[in-house]
Amino acid sequence: MATITTAQMKILEAINRYTFLTVPLIDILKIHKNKVSIYRSLQGLKNRSKPLVYTQNYGVHPTKGQLPSLLYLSSYAKELLLEGGYMENQIHIPTNRTFVSSDYFHRITNIQMHLYMDIYLQSMENAELLFLDYYFSKSQTSQKLYARAKNRIDLQNDRYIIPDIITKFIVGEKEYLYLVEIHNGTNSNKAFYQCLQHIKAIDLGSPKKKYNHPTNNRVIFIFEHKSCMDAVMRKMNENKDLQKYRNLFLFNTKENIQRDFSKHWMKCNGEETLFY
């Protein structure tokens, strides 16, 4: 087994849990006291004959400056985790590591949602995250090598949706099934159309059938811009045919979940509510 420190092992396990991480995201996990120590640990994981961590660089953004590189595990890290007691299906190494730059911020927000949700649930004594899959997670549909999106939810006439995140968690004795959409930009019509597609899925019972869940799932929308969120909530609230779905949709902003994940969750009528 490769020789690594306790902190380096925690970093490997964190990258494995979230599939991708950046140094600022690792910093949130408080594995090290500062980013300098994180960089030092990462150098030890990358600069070896059999690297345990690889990086995907995105260069400089015209308005945001240098973008933090995405970190992901190598096949050597997979061997290390297997030796350490992990099961094959518990190891997350991306099958496709070539990403267009336009997906960078969307992917980061998905990972942030997972990370802050983890921290929130771990703060409660009676809560547990059962699983969480991303839009880029793949699953084998047969013995063939073809892999389809793990988050695919079938509708009708060969149509389907692929939510950004599908997750199930438990609080007390109750399980919750949530489908999550991350919306960057200001196109409220696009986000509202996504809401309607989720309503079709709920009406068909597709999510609860796929995940053997006794009740309808809830749908979470995370917005980059509050103005866009407000527009979508208003469109839903003004449509009388959609009133019966009011309790199945929750809305929040990216800024809010970073500040305090437990607060500012809203129904389409603007009423604040709990996350679960």
Image (cartoon, rainbow, N blue to C red):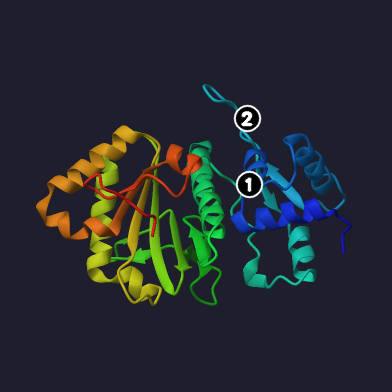
Image: 152 above or below 32: below
Q: Is residue 77 left or right of residue 143?
A: right
Image: 31 above or below 154: above
Provide residue 25's location: percent of width, then percent of height. 62, 43
Q: How many numbered circles does the render carry?
A: 2
Residue at x-position 24% and y-position 59%: 199
Q: Is residue 225 left or right of residue 138?
A: left
Query: Judging from the image, what secondary structure is the residue with disc 1 in?
Result: loop
- The residue identified by callout 2 is 59
Comparing 58 with 1, the one in front is: 1
Provide residue 56's location: percent of width, then percent of height. 65, 42
Query: Label 2 sits on what residue type?
Result: Gly
Say whether disc 1 or disc 2 marks the residue closer to the N-terminus: 1
Residue at x-position 49% and y-position 44%: 109
- Determine which quarter of the picture holds residue 16: bottom right
Return the residue found at the far left. 240
Query: Label 1 sits on what residue type?
Result: Leu
Return the residue found at the far top. 63
Provide residue 179's location: percent of width, then percent of height. 38, 59
Q: Is residue 224 left or right of residue 128?
A: left
Sort mark 1 into few (<14), some (14-19) or many (20+) by Cα contacts within 10 Å.
many
- The residue identified by callout 1 is 21
Residue at x-position 73% and y-position 36%: 35
Q: Nearer the viewer, mark 1 or mark 2?
A: 1
Query: Judging from the image, what secondary structure is the residue with disc 2 in?
Result: loop
- Determine which quarter of the picture holds residue 66: top right
Q: CA distance from mark 1 to mark 2?
A: 16 Å
